Amino acid sequence: MRIKYSVIIPTYNREPLLAEALQSVQAALPDCSEVIVVNDGTEFERPTCDLIETLGAVAVKTKGGLGAGAARNIGADCARGQWLCF
């Protein structure tokens, strides 16, 4: 199946909000989609990593502190979808 939509979520040390965002995105995501989480902050705790894995999302780690624009660009480079949603 070809990926049509790539949802890219850049984040910086917001794990509780990230969990809510991931669950919300998964509930509304069409079948032909992917979710990419770009972590620009500290390493995720194990529960967050488990949630990302369980939901089938992809996690990408930056060098840290690059900023939202750089995190979006890194996510876009990893995306396989025809349409990118940030």
Image: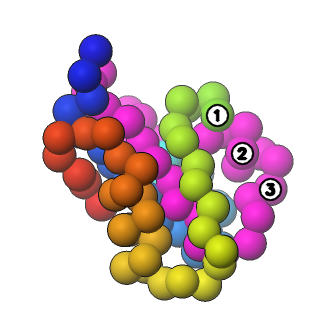
Residue 37 within the segment the image draws in magenta = yes
Q: Secondary structure at mark 3?
A: loop
How packed mark 1 is, by other alpha carbons closer than 10 Å (few <14, some 14-19, many 20 or more), is few
Mark 1 and mark 3: Cα distance apart in space? 13 Å
- Residue 35: x and y in percent read 42, 42
Q: Is residue 8 magenta?
A: no
**What label sits on residue 45 in the rendered view?**
3
Position of residue 83 relative to residue 71, above or below, is above
Q: Is residue 29 above or below residue 65?
A: above
* Residue at mark 2: 49
Q: Position of residue 14 (x, y in %)?
A: 61, 70
> Distance of mark 2 from mark 3, alpha carbons?
6 Å
Residue type (three-letter) at the residue carrying disc 3: Glu
SS at mark 1?
helix
Among the two numbered marks 1 and 3 on one chain, the one whose residue lies closer to the N terminus? 3
Q: Residues within 10 Å of mark 2 (few under 14, many from 20)?
A: some
Numbered badge on residue 8: none
Q: Indicate which disc residue 53 carries.
A: 1
Residue drawn at x 64%, y 34% as measured from the top left:
53
Front residue (pair 64, 54): 64
Marks 1/2 in contact by CB < 8 Å: the verdict is yes
Q: Amino acid at mark 2?
A: Cys
Badge 2 element: helix
Res. 33 visible in picture: yes
Q: Are marks 2 and 3 in contact (CB under 8 Å)?
A: yes
Quadrant that contains the C terminus: bottom left
What stretch of residues is rendered in magenta? 23-52
